[in-house]
Amino acid sequence: MHELGVVFHIIDQVEEVAAENDVTRIDSVTLQLGEVSTVIPSYLTDCWDWAKKKHELLLEAKLVVEKIEAVTFCEDCKQTYPTVEYGKTCPHCGSGNTYLVQGNEFMIKEIEAV
């Protein structure tokens, strides 16, 4: 489970931003998480709920996860399609000459502070 390491990284980043802005309490952290990022949202939330108790700044902080749909582009027919549904084979032309356009991101979108 690499989600715990991911949570520690998020906490480090949030604490750094809080220190730079003289923030003493965080209400929420919003993440954008790609559909095929390999991070499991429920594990991430469980790890967050455990780890935040060890940081005064985050005791009441809520973790909000926004899903970014995975989209693949076909270089042969120049169309996009939903990655999870069709994988690497283009449903429009049957080509395997494709690449992921979006859906593996993992970003802190917003930190809400008091």
Image: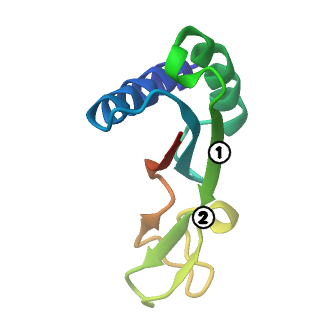
Residue drawn at the location 45% of the way across and 25% of the way down: 11
> Number of marks in the image?
2
**Quarter of the image where one finds residue 69:** bottom right
Label 2's element?
loop
Q: Residue 88 in the image: x percent, y percent?
A: 53, 64
Q: Residues within 10 Å of mark 1 (few under 14, many from 20)?
A: some
Q: Residue at x 73, y 33 (%)?
A: 42
Please tell me whether mark 1 or mark 2 is closer to you in this view: 1
- The amino acid sitting under disc 2 is Glu
Residue type at mark 1 is Val
Q: Quadrant of the N terminus?
A: top right
Query: Which residue bears the numbered disc 2?
Result: 69
In the picture, the disc for residue 64 is 1
Q: Residue at x 65, y 67 (%)?
A: 86
Tell me, for residue 25, which label it has, or none.
none
Q: Is residue 29 above or below residue 109?
A: above
Q: Nearer the viewer, residue 44 or 76?
A: 44
Q: Is residue 93 above or below residue 21?
A: below
Q: Position of residue 16 (x, y in %)?
A: 31, 29
